[in-house]
Image: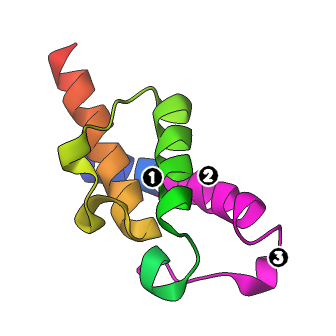
Amino acid sequence: MYWEKELAMVETFASEIKAFIISNFLFGQEAASFADDQSFLESGIIDSTGLLELVSFVEQRYGVSIADRELVPENLDSLKNISQFVARKLDAVGAKG
């Protein structure tokens, strides 16, 4: 049951983050969409400056703080990675609270 709730959260994050990326980096072009595991940087969807904008969005939207050491592709370079990363961050915050 827990994993189902977490999966639903990840899907929600993915949907919200994808909408942000389409709106801000693909200029609203749904047709220019991308796969969940597609690299943002390798595909040219987001450049290094755009990655900082994405980090700022995630921090503000979800109330998490992303440390410099967490700014790695494993956490941020695809929709799948960033959605799972946000879920882990929120889970860690919940565990502390």
For mark 1, what is the residue? Answer: 8
Residue 64 place in picture, x, y as percent: 38, 30
Position of 6 with respect to 17 (left or right) is left
Q: Which residue type does callout 2 highlight? A: Glu
Residue sticking out furthest to the top: 97
Q: Quadrant of residue 45?
A: bottom right
Question: Which residue does the numbered mark 3 point to in the structure image?
Answer: 29
* Residue at point 24%, 43% (across, down): 68
Kind of residue indicated by mark 1: Ala
Gap between marks 1 and 2 measured at Cα:
12 Å
* Cα–Cα span, label 3 and label 1: 25 Å
Query: Can residue 7 be seen here?
Result: yes
| Foreground pick, 61 / 5 | 61
Element type at mark 3: loop
Say which element carries label 2: helix
Q: Relative to 50, is 41 on the left or the right?
A: left
Q: Is residue 71 shown above or below 29? A: above
Pick the front one: 66 or 16:
66
**In the depicted structure, whether residue 84 falls above or below residue 26:** above
Q: Position of residue 42 (x, y in %)?
A: 43, 85
Q: Nearer the viewer, mark 2 or mark 3?
A: 3
Circle 2 crowding by C-alpha within 10 Å: few under 14, some 14–19, many from 20: some
Q: Amino acid at mark 3?
A: Gln
- Label placed on residue 16: 2
Distance (Cα) linking label 2 and label 3: 15 Å
- Above or below for 46 versus 61: below
Q: Which quadrant is home to the C terminus?
A: top left
Going 45% across and 52% down the picture, which residue do you hit?
8
Which span is picked out in magenta? 11-38
Q: Is residue 38 visible from the viewing direction of this image?
A: no
Residue at figure coordinates x 48%, y 75% from the top left: 40
Q: Is residue 13 magenta-colored?
A: yes
